[in-house]
Image: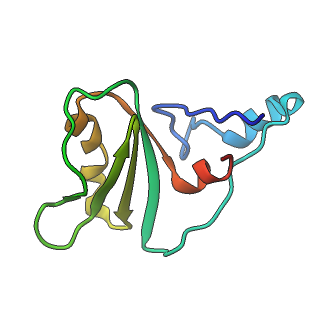
Amino acid sequence: MSLVVLLRGVNVGGHRAFRPSTLVGQLKHLDAVIFSGHLVRPDIVRFVSVLSHSPRSTPSTPMSFPSTGKWLMRILARESRFVVRLYRRHMKVIGYLGTLDRVFGVPVTTRNWNTITAHC
C-alpha cells in the first residue's frame, strides 16, 4: 500500500529550503519516491487542495478569480475535503493562491495534480 505525505508550509526552493530528494534519501528504507508527472498545458497548472477539516462555509463552484475578465485561478469543484483548482502561470496569480483558506474558512494544504495522480 502506498502512502502520500502532504507537508504544509514547506519552502521547496531557495536558501535553507526543504529538499524532497534529501528526505527521500533518508527514507529509502521505506521505499520512498519523488513525485513525477507532466502538465497537459504548459500555461495552466492543475492542483488539489485538502481542507484540514469540514469547511465553515460551502461556496458554490465553479468560482473564478478575479471574478471578471480573464481568470487567473479557478476553483472547479469540491468533494468532501478535496478541492480541485487551476491557475494560470502569471505573476498576479500569487495574490490569489491563499484565497482558498479564506473562502472555506479552514487551513488548506495544496499539491500539484501530478503529485496526487502519481500515487492513486
Q: What scheme was used to colour the molecule?
A: rainbow
- Residue 29 position in % (x across, y down): 89, 28
- Residue 16 position in % (x across, y down): 57, 35
Residue drawn at 80 percent across, 29 percent down: 27
Compared with 3, 37 (above or below) is below
- Residue 83 position in % (x across, y down): 38, 45
Position of 41 compared to 84: left or right? Answer: right
Compared with 92, 112 (above or below) is above
Residue 6 occupies quadrant: top right
Position of 1 compared to 105: left or right? Answer: right
Compared with 72, 33 (above or below) is above
Which residue ends up furthest to the left in the rendered image? Answer: 68
Total numbered labels placed on residues in the image: 0
Residue drawn at 49 percent across, 74 percent down: 42
Position of 5 compared to 54: left or right? Answer: right
Position of 90 compared to 40: left or right? Answer: left
Residue drawn at 54 percent across, 31 percent down: 7
Compared with 20, 87 (above or below) is below
Residue drawn at 20 percent across, 48 percent down: 60
Viewer-side residue, 32 vs 16: 32
Question: Where the N terminus falls, by quadrant?
Answer: top right
Which residue ends up furthest to the right in the rendered image? Answer: 29
